[in-house]
């Protein structure tokens, strides 16, 4: 069974590419592949090449000339991915692509039908929904709620709370309480802090450099978030499936 993981959020600049980049760091010695669907920036494809190499990254345009996602395009993408050698694939959706995927489930392909089609292809589909704070929170939470209603129980959903975008630990705790007692899994990640070491991690991400470019404090900050992401992957994917 091939595992395909969708990284989604219709609000831009919330940490989808940040999470994908740390996944690539965690998976660079595996056979995991990455797909960049962000038509506007191609951020993931540009940043991941230095981490996992060009052969494990693809940029795909899935929107038509009217910036709409058609069922044929997404099904064709899943069909093509079902035939690749990588057992695990992460797909980073742009904001527009995330919104269009929600509309696809709402108006074109209900989740239960998509589940049936993917089962025929031996694909296990999972959803990672990024949740950011401050002025992005309301939009992020609204997207999560709408997508959750559409997915129902047909697919596994993991909410990833980008802790670095919240003002303080108390606010993060209040946000997490929204998911306690529900069937939705949630995890925190991405708290790089406000010190120079956190800014240095963002800098090597942007410039396509590796951990070796960081000073000691930068390396400590980088490894802290990397361990968070490794635990998220290990918990929700199972090491035995991915070696």
Image (cartoon, helix red, strand yellow):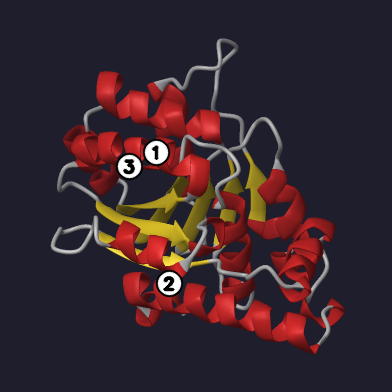
Q: Locate residue 147 relative to residue 206 in the image: left or right.
A: left
Q: Quadrant of residue 205?
A: bottom right
The residue tagged 2 is: 233
Q: Position of residue 93 (x, y in %)?
A: 52, 41
Q: How many marks?
A: 3
Q: Residue at x 79, y 89 (%)?
A: 216
Quarter of the image with the N terminus in it: bottom left
**Quick one: SS at disc 2?**
helix
The residue tagged 1 is: 138
In primary-sequence order, the first of circles 2 and 1 is: 1
Q: Residue at x 68, y 86 (%)?
A: 220
Q: What's the distance in space between the residues labelled 2 and 3, CA to CA?
A: 20 Å
The residue tagged 3 is: 144
In the depicted structure, whether residue 102 falls above or below residue 207:
above
In primary-sequence order, the first of circles 1 and 3 is: 1
Q: Position of residue 217 (x, y in %)?
A: 75, 85
Q: Residue at x 50, y 57 (%)?
A: 166
Nearer the observer, disc 2 or disc 3?
A: 3
Q: What's the distance in space between the residues labelled 1 and 3, CA to CA?
A: 10 Å
């Amino acid at each position: 069974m091939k595992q395909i993981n969708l990284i989604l959020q219709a609000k831009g600049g919330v940490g989808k590419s940040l999470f994908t980049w740390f996944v690539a760091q965690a998976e660079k010695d595996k056979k995991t592949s990455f797909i960049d669907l962000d038509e506007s920036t191609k951020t993931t494809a540009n940043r991941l090449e230095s981490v996992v190499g060009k052969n494990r990254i693809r940029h795909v345009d899935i929107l038509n000339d009217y910036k709409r996602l058609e069922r044929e395009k997404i099904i064709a993408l899943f069909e093509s991915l079902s035939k690749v050698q990588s057992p695990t694939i992460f797909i980073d959706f742009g904001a527009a692509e995330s919104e269009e995927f929600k509309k696809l489930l709402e108006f074109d392909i209900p989740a239960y039908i998509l589940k049936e089609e993917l089962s025929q292809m031996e694909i296990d589909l999972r959803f990672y929904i990024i949740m950011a704070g401050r002025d992005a929170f309301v939009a992020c939470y609204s997207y999560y709620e709408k997508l959750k209603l559409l997915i129902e129980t047909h697919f596994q959903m993991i909410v990833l709370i980008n802790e670095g975008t919240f003002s303080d630990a108390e606010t993060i705790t209040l946000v997490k309480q929204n998911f306690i007692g529900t069937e939705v899994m949630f995890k925190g990640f991405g708290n790089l802090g406000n010190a120079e070491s956190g800014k240095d991690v963002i800098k090597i991400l942007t410039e396509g450099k590796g951990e070796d470019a960081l000073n000691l404090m930068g390396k400590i900050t980088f490894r802290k978030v990397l361990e968070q992401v490794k635990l998220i992957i290990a918990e929700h994917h199972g090491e035995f499936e991915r070696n």
